[in-house]
Image: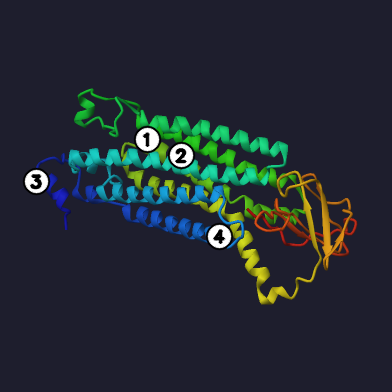
Amino acid sequence: MLAADIQQALTDGRIPNGISTEYLAASKDSGAEAGILAVLALALIITALRLYARISDPRGLVLEDYLIILTAAQLITFVGLCLKLLALGSGRHIEYIEYVLPLSTVNTTEVLDFTAHIIYTTALYTCRMSGLSFYRRLCLRHGVLSLAVNISFGLITAGFVPQLLLIIFHCTPVTGLWPYPWQPEYASGRYACINWGVVYLTNSIVSLVSDLILFVIPIALIAVYRGSIKNKVKLSVVLIPGILVIAISITRLDLVHRGWTDQDQSWSYGPMLAIETAEIAGTMVALSAPTLKVFFGRVYHASTFHGSSKDQATGRRTNDCGYGAGVLGARARDAGTELEGWQRGRVVGNETVVGAGQEASVDGEDGRGSEEDLLVARAGVGSKDGGLKVSTTVEMRT
């Protein structure tokens, strides 16, 4: 059965010859909507687990957690606007928008799109600041990495400001509209606007560069961790899921370019909204991975099955890479007895790792091995490296 709006447009004679009603009725909104809701649900579940893990820790929530909460609120708002835009027809063929939608509805979709992309850009920035806050805490005592984090903050902020200004001031005078050539607002010459493709493509490139800046920091962290290749791989699994975010950002760039160059520019709008939602959600998930690794590690180590195997001595140490705080050095404990003397061997940053028969860990600023613990490497006997053997436990704590 023909949709009422298409039937009305046909009756009014607004549909030119050569455009079929089947073409106008075509829609792929359901797939975009399902994708949007799926990634939203995933992001909220992961964020809830992250916050539960933080709250269950004596230290509670820290700055990056509050920023993630703010990002989640922005994501929910953005998703609501995306679903409204699709419901109004923004993801249909451009001919549907031109010939079927009332001009008042077209104006509404343009204002909603304007608002949605301000929220989208701000949400990504907020989430990236959450990540940088975490990395800054991680590298607080490592001069070079700490400087790199601060520079990254400046670069990402320097990218965010023009992104936001390009959206706000895309037309003169300022308006939420972005008139098509066939709209009265365009024909009247009331607004002088930058082509939407230029704005979106520029912002997509800046967003991709920002993701590259953000997720190159974990690579640097892994580079200064001088453990076994096996442990580096495990650490990479925790620290570098951001590669997926970069892939999503590249996909968005491709969709924007396609929408700009294709004659039927609105047909890729629905998938683009889904990808934008995935970009925010993916960044949230990627930055929550270290916390979840620690949380599930605690659950495993606290289990009855695993608890009987924890009869090893515990090592404590601090370093100047923010993996811990305090002066360089270490204390290995065995049944409450403090053992001094680290052996030369593997190094995390500038920190010497404990020798055979002891368990080495990186403590937090309070030295209690709680929420600030980042790396736990168990040493065993019979290693080929001067008696040092690092086990499979590599832990990042946020």
Image x and y of residue 396, in percent: 66, 55
Image x and y of residue 379, in percent: 82, 61
| Residue receiving disc 2 | 253
| Mark toward the start of the polypeptide (3 vs 4) | 3
Q: Secondary structure at mark 1?
A: helix
Q: Is residue 357 left or right of residue 323?
A: right
Q: Are marks 2 and 4 in contact (CB under 8 Å)?
A: no
Inter-mark Cα distance, 2 to 4? 37 Å
Tell me which amino acid carries mark 1.
Trp
Tell me which amino acid carries mark 3.
Thr
The N terminus sits in image quarter:
bottom left
| Mark toward the start of the polypeptide (1 vs 3) | 3
Inter-mark Cα distance, 1 to 3? 31 Å
Inter-mark Cα distance, 4 to 1? 45 Å
| Residue receiving disc 3 | 11
| Mark toward the start of the polypeptide (4 vs 1) | 4
| Mark toward the start of the polypeptide (1 vs 2) | 2
Residue at the spot 26% in from the left edge and 32% down from the top edge: 180
Image x and y of residue 354, in percent: 84, 56
Question: In the rendering, which numbered label is found on residue 260?
Answer: 1
Q: Secondary structure at mark 2?
A: helix
Residue at the spot 19% in from the left edge and 47% down from the top edge: 20
Mark 1: give few (<14), some (14-19) or many (20+) Cα within 10 Å.
Answer: some
Image x and y of residue 19, in percent: 20, 43
| Quadrant of the rendered image containing residue 187 | top left
Question: In the rendering, which numbered label is found on residue 55?
Answer: 4
Above or below, comparing residue 26 to residue 209 in the picture = below
Between label 3 and label 4, give the one nearer the viewer: 4
Q: Are marks 1 and 2 in contact (CB under 8 Å)?
A: no
Tell me which amino acid carries mark 2.
Leu
Q: Is residue 45 visible?
A: yes
| Mark toward the start of the polypeptide (2 vs 4) | 4
